[in-house]
Image (tube, helix red, strand yellow):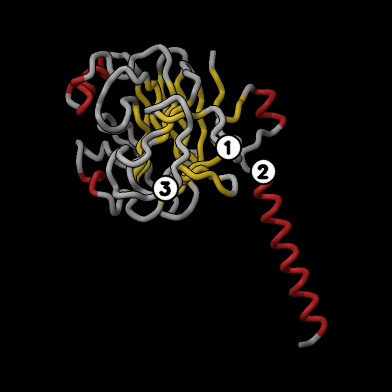
Amino acid sequence: MNSGIYYKRILLALFILMVASTANAQLNTLTAQEKKEGWQLLFDGKSGKGWRSAKANTFPTAANGWIIKNGTLTIQASNGAESQNVGDIITVNEYGAFALSFDFKLTKGANSGVKYFVTLKEDSGASAIGLEYQVLDDEVHPDAKLGRDGNRTLASLYDLKTSNKAGAVKPIGEWNTGKIVVHPNNQVEHWLNGMKVLEYERKSPEYRELVKISKYKVWPNFGEAHTGHILLQDHGNEVSYRNIKLKELK
């Protein structure tokens, strides 16, 4: 092999490694500006610190459940059942008004969700009850065809309000960024990859009418708690999360 080509290949490989190392170093960190604005990391990329099982006071450590590797928090695939393997995880702390940002990556046909205002007061027998930012492969998972008018699709307020996300979705296997903003006046927004895809007012007459025609009608005052936990759902499919950060709003 020509020595010039050989050295060029070495330099290219070193450049790729340097870029990858820089990208990984930026995962699960806060910029100086974010720190100044009051953002806090909910996942440090190395441990389950700040999280616990929705069924116990400790982080689930089963080998076939939630794993933390290369700065990523992944629920491993089991049988596709809702919270029947190791189950959901929730933040130790509870939050009221906040902005929550998170990266997520779906595998083909996968289902999960990010819930908020989770109180654990209800005993559903499956996933803990709360308002849910749906995380779903709309093309393959059957839940996308259920509910009403697409209100169980990606980035929707699950079973309540449909997201309008045309042009915002990245392909399965790539990282997407979700965002939930709950303002102090109970105005709520769902965002996907920088696009606002829905909004509603928690506790409003319109919101309560949506609850009345949803699966949540059996739970009194659903979604109206003053504060609650953030939840990542185990729905029996492989889904990964990273860069989970929150800013409390006042």
Residue, far bottom: 1
Label for residue 23? Answer: none
Secondary-structure class at tag 1: loop
Q: In the rendered view, would you say 151 is above or below 141?
A: above
Q: CA distance from mark 1 to mark 3?
A: 16 Å
Quadrant housing residue 230: top left
Label for residue 26? Answer: 2
Q: Earlier in the sequence, mark 2 or mark 3?
A: 2
Label 3 sits on residue: 64
Residue drawn at 35 percent across, 37 percent down: 134
Amino acid type indicated by mark 3: Asn
Amino acid type indicated by mark 2: Gln
Query: In x, y percent, where is residue 110?
Result: 34, 49
Label 1 sits on residue: 47
Residue drawn at 42 percent across, 34 percent down: 232
Q: In the rendered view, would you say 137 is above or below 150?
A: below
Query: In x, y percent, where is residue 35?
Result: 68, 26
The quarter in which the N terminus is drawn is bottom right
133 relative to 218 in the view: left or right: right
Residue drawn at 63 percent across, 22 percent down: 38
Which one is in front, 195 or 84? 84
Q: Is residue 231 visible?
A: yes
Secondary-structure class at tag 2: loop
Query: In x, y percent, where is residue 169?
Result: 42, 48
Which one is in front, 95 or 150? 95
Amino acid type indicated by mark 1: Ser
Which one is in front, 218 or 122? 122
Query: In x, y percent, where is residue 183?
Result: 46, 18
The quarter in which the C terminus is drawn is top right
Q: Earlier in the sequence, mark 2 or mark 1?
A: 2
97 relative to 86 in the view: left or right: right
